[in-house]
Image (spheres, rainbow, N blue to C red):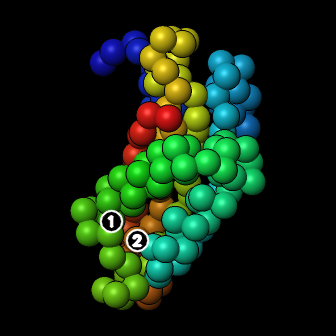
Amino acid sequence: MSDTVGIGKISILLTISDDYEKLKEKYEQYGYTIYRGNVGSMDSQKIVAAIETASLREDIIRENYHEEHSLYHAIIESLSGYCRGQVILGELQRTAGLTFAVVRGNLILGDKSSGEWISVVLYGQIGSPRKGFEHEAIGMGIQSI
C-alpha cells in the first residue's frame, strides 16, 4: 500500500471514524475544508439537496457554476457507488440512512501542485424501508475544482 494520502482516503476516514473531531482538526491544518453530516431519505434528490445546502452553508463551495458543478458530479458519483450503480431509491422501495462527508483541498496531502479538488463520501444503511432489511454501503466521488 502506498504511503501517499489522498483526498479520497481522508474523506473516507472522516466519514466512518469515531474520532471525527480529532481527524478534522488534523486535516484542516493542511488546508482542507471539511464537513460531515447525516441525511436519510427514499428520494435521491433530497440527499443531493442536503449535501449541496450543507456545502454552501459551510463555505466548502462558493455559489458559482464551476464549483457547484464539481460538487454535483462528486455527489452523483458517490451516490452511484453507494447505490451500486443504480441511483434509484424510493422508486424501488429502497431507503438510505447515511453519514456524508464533503472535503475540499489538494488531491494529495501536502502537494499543492496536485490542485484543488472536492470529495464526497456517503456511508450508511441502504435497503428496504423495513427495520432489519438493510445493509451497509459506501460510495465516493472526487472531482477537480
Contact? badges 1 and 2 (CB < 8 Å): yes
Q: Secondary structure at mark 2?
A: strand
Label for residue 93? none
With respect to residue 14, does 79 lie above or below?
below
Q: Residues within 10 Å of mark 2 (few under 14, many from 20)?
A: many
- Amino acid type assigned to the residue bearing label 2 in the image: Ile
Query: The disc labelled 1 sits on which kind of residue?
Result: Cys
Mark 1 or mark 2, which has the lower sequence index?
Answer: 1
- Quadrant where the N terminus sits is top left
Q: Quadrant of residue 57?
A: bottom right
Q: Nearer the viewer, residue 34 or 56?
A: 56
Residue with the mark numbered 2: 126
Farthest residue, direction front: 65
Mark 1 → mark 2, Cα distance in angstroms: 8 Å
Point 64% across, 28% down: residue = 32
Helix, strand, or loop for circle 1?
Answer: loop
Q: Residue 101 at what x, y percent from top left?
A: 57, 48
Disc ID at residue 83: 1
| x and y, in percent, of residue 5 in the image | 45, 20
Query: Residue 134 in the image: x percent, y percent?
Result: 39, 75
Please name the residue shown 65% across and 18% down the image: 30
On the question of residue 25 being in view, the answer is yes
Q: Position of residue 115 (x, y in %)?
A: 49, 21
